[in-house]
Image: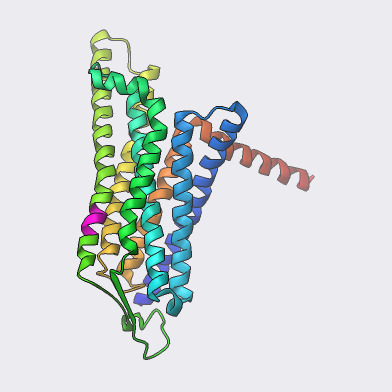
């Protein structure tokens, strides 16, 4: 019974990962095509390319990790391979979270309207700062993932029978004492982009509230372009904030090693982690007309192809 539930959540995680690959692939294709046509790499397109590429790589790596743990258990839980997969996973994980945080900062600087000198300075220079923000966060992610390459895992495979979903309790991945320090480093690495994300979200909400109060005082109505831009950005950021926190909790539980491999708890965490990149990519697609055009064109060509064949 437990094995069936585990398989169900694993199947859900695979479906979510496939949806995430399609969504992030679509975002990456649209931004790349836009840059090639205009021959100009805008700050927004740069952030979206880095974000979608990191998430596409992350979900591909997660699926590869899952398939190897399911079908190549003996080889996967050899120490070198296991540590390599976790190190690369953490690098892609940190990178995608940082790029998403920079996207919220970009929304905040472009949409919010504050008169503080620092905010004005940031608003004027955000385009030139974006490349440095992306490069710095990539280097930071690489540095924070390096400790996972240390010899912190003791992987012991105690096989008394062929491993299956029902006897996975016979397999253990034990930790050295330094792993608890690694957990603290992981939390710090995930918490920093979370702080950046939350601060920019709060500033954007405050800007929306100030803008709404001004419109009420002037009695100019509520449906101007600025307010719609605020609401669209807020919906996108709030939806990702929920997914972000869910992803953070699931990641900490996975890294804490409190679940047996392929248990129901681990499978649920994998499904929740796969939902975050997929869910946010869908929000970005449907909240931006630029991204909605690609699915619409694909559906249009598909309908035309079906009609042509039917005739």
> Which quadrant of the view contains residue 297?
top right
Horizontal side, residue 177 vs residue 284: left or right: left
Q: Residue furthest top?
A: 218
Q: Position of residue 217 (x, y in %)?
A: 23, 10
Regarding residue 233, the answer to whether it shows in the image is yes
Q: Position of residue 25 (x, y in %)?
A: 53, 46
> Where are the magenta residues, as a range?
183-187
Q: Residue at x 47, y 44 (%)?
A: 52
Provide the major secondary structure of the magenta segment: helix
Q: Residue furthest right?
A: 311
Indicate the colouring scheme. rainbow
The quadrant of the rendering that contains the N terminus is bottom left
Comparing 203 with 286, the one in front is 203
Residue 253 to residue 52: above or below: below
Residue 285 to residue 78: above or below: above
The quadrant of the rendering that contains the C terminus is top right
Q: Residue at x 39, y 79 (%)?
A: 165
Q: Residue furthest bottom?
A: 160
Q: Residue at x 41, y 26 (%)?
A: 127
Residue 114 to residue 276: above or below: above
Q: Position of residue 129 (x, y in %)?
A: 37, 29
> Which quadrant of the view contains residue 308?
top right
Regarding residue 113, the answer to whether it shows in the image is no
Instruction: Give yes or no for residue 185 being in the magenta stretch.
Output: yes
């Amino acid at each position: 019974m437990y094995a069936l539930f585990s398989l169900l959540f694993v199947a859900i995680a695979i479906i979510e990962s496939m949806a995430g690959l399609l969504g992030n692939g679509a975002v990456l294709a649209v931004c790349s095509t836009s840059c090639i046509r205009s021959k100009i790499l805008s700050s927004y397109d740069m952030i979206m390319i880095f974000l979608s590429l990191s998430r596409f790589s992350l979900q591909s790596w997660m699926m590869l990790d899952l398939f190897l743990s399911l079908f190549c258990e003996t080889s996967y839980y050899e120490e070198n391979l296991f540590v390599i997969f976790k190190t690369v996973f953490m690098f892609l994980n940190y990178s995608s979270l940082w790029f998403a945080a920079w996207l919220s900062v970009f929304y905040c600087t472009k949409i919010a309207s504050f008169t503080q000198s620092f905010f004005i300075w940031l608003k004027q220079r955000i385009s030139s700062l974006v490349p440095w923000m992306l490069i710095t966060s990539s280097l930071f992610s690489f540095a924070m993932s390096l400790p996972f390459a240390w010899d912190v895992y003791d992987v012991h495979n105690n096989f008394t029978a062929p491993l299956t979903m029902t006897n996975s309790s016979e397999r253990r991945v034990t930790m050295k004492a330094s792993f608890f320090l690694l957990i603290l480093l992981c939390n710090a690495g995930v918490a920093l982009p979370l702080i950046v994300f939350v601060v920019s979200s709060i500033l954007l909400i405050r800007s929306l509230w100030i803008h709404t109060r001004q419109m009420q005082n002037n009695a100019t109505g509520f449906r101007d372009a600025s307010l719609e831009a605020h609401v669209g950005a807020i919906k996108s950021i709030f939806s990702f904030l929920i997914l972000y926190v869910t992803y953070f909790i699931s990641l900490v539980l996975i890294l804490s090693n409190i679940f047996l491999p392929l248990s129901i708890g681990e499978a649920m965490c994998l499904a929740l982690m796969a939902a975050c990149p997929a869910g946010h990519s869908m929000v970005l697609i449907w909240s931006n007309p630029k991204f909605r055009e690609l699915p619409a064109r694909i559906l249009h060509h598909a309908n035309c192809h079906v009609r042509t064949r039917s005739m």
